Amino acid sequence: MRDRERVNAYAFGTRTAQFHICANCGIVPLVTSLIADRLFAVVNVNTFDDVNAVRLNRIPASFDGESEGDRLKRRERYWISSVTYEK
């Protein structure tokens, strides 16, 4: 999103991640998590234009019961690391 003023950040109960929500449509294209002074991110490919759904490998996931430590380790392992924002 080019207009950052239209993006609101929200943190759920554990406050270990920021969900970046479009104020216009309510979608969440990006989630970030600050872990050990490094910013990690995951993007929601469902918000991209012209993505061929056949190329996506969708698998069910549940994070219920996951400890905070395990959650942060999973993010460090699988999320995009060393994220920076451009102005």
Image (cartoon, rainbow, N blue to C red):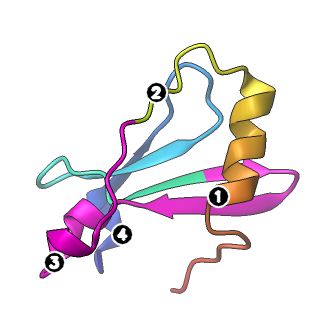
Question: Alpha-carbon distance for marks 1 and 2?
Answer: 15 Å
Mark 2: secondary structure: loop
Q: Position of residue 27 (x, y in %)?
A: 21, 51
| Residue that carries the numbered disc 3 in the rendered image | 52
The residue at the point 85 percent across, 57 percent down is 37
Residue 77 quadrant:
bottom right
Category of crowding for the residue at label 2, using alpha-carbon neighbours closer than 10 angstroms: few (below 14), some (14–19), many (at least 20): few
Q: Nearer the viewer, residue 19 or 62?
A: 62
Mark 4: secondary structure: helix
Whichever of labels 3 and 4 marks the residue nearer the N terminus, that label is 4
Label tally: 4
Mark 3: secondary structure: loop
| Residue that carries the numbered disc 1 in the rendered image | 78
Q: Amino acid at mark 1?
A: Tyr
Q: Amino acid at mark 2?
A: Ser
Q: Nearer the viewer, residue 39 or 62?
A: 62
Q: Nearer the viewer, residue 1 or 29?
A: 29
| Residue that carries the numbered disc 4 in the rendered image | 4
| Residue that carries the numbered disc 2 in the rendered image | 62
Residue 53 drawn in magenta: yes
Q: Amino acid at mark 3?
A: Asn
Question: Alpha-carbon distance for marks 3 and 2?
Answer: 25 Å
The residue at the point 53 percent across, 26 percent down is 63
Question: Alpha-carbon distance for marks 1 and 4?
Answer: 26 Å
Q: Position of residue 58 (x, y in %)?
A: 31, 53
26 vs 13, left or right, is left
Q: Position of residue 20 (x, y in %)?
A: 40, 52
